[in-house]
Image (spheres, grey):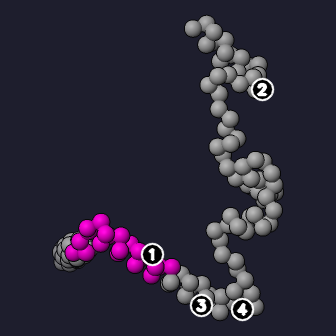
Amino acid sequence: DESLIESLRDKFVTGKWDDQGAGAKDDDSELGDFEDLETGEQYGPDGAVLSDDDRSANSDEEDDMPTEGMTDAEIREYNARKKAGQKKSFDDGYDEEKKAEGGNLKDDEVENEYLETLKRQKEERLRRNEEE
């Protein structure tokens, strides 16, 4: 028990960071890529600075090249079409997932009916309040 307290005190007070005990893990190998938010530099799992090619290979974002030379209105239209396409693909994927899980699309109908009932009740309360 006393040796446990001494080992804890040693780690927090004197800070022997080089001396790793039997149960210590090397966390650097588990962390993966790192980006310095102040400088924007990206580092790989081994601590090496990633080049622009490495960054673009790991990047999930699309290039903004299609919008170069476009007017603001054209950019808005382009983004609206892109957003509509993404929404449609999400909706289609969601519907397919719901069907695959055995979900019933009638659940939406039941929910809509419930919401309509609530809306009618609210309108009725408003009408009664106005009459008073």
Decide: is 9 above or below 128.
above
- Quadrant of the snapshot with the C terminus: bottom left
Instruction: Specify the amino acid type for callout 3.
Output: Glu
Alpha carbons under labels 4 and 2: distance apart: 57 Å
* Local SS, label 4: loop
Whether 16 is among the magenta residues is: no
* Local SS, label 2: loop
Provide the residue span drawn in magenta.
86-106
Q: Nearer the viewer, residue 86 or 44?
A: 44
Alpha carbons under labels 2 and 3: distance apart: 58 Å
* Residue occupying the point 71% across, 25% down: 20
Q: Are marks 3 and 1 in contact (CB under 8 Å)?
A: no
Dot 1, crowdedness within 10 Å: few (<14), some or many (≥20)?
few
Q: Is residue 57 visible?
A: yes
Alpha carbons under labels 1 and 4: distance apart: 27 Å
Q: Nearer the viewer, residue 39 or 60?
A: 60
Q: Quadrant of residue 120 in the image?
A: bottom left
Decide: is 5 above or below 40.
above
Q: Quadrant of residue 105 in the image?
A: bottom left
Residue 99: where, in percent of width, then height? 29, 72
Instruction: Specify the amino acid type for callout 4.
Output: Met
Residue 87: where, in percent of width, then height? 47, 79
Dot 3, crowdedness within 10 Å: few (<14), some or many (≥20)?
few
Which of the two marks, 1 or 4, is nearer to us in this view? 1
Earlier sequence position, callout 1 versus callout 4: 4
Alpha carbons under labels 4 and 3: distance apart: 10 Å
Q: Which mark is residue 70?
A: 4
Q: Which residue is mark 3?
A: 77
Alpha carbons under labels 2 and 1: distance apart: 50 Å
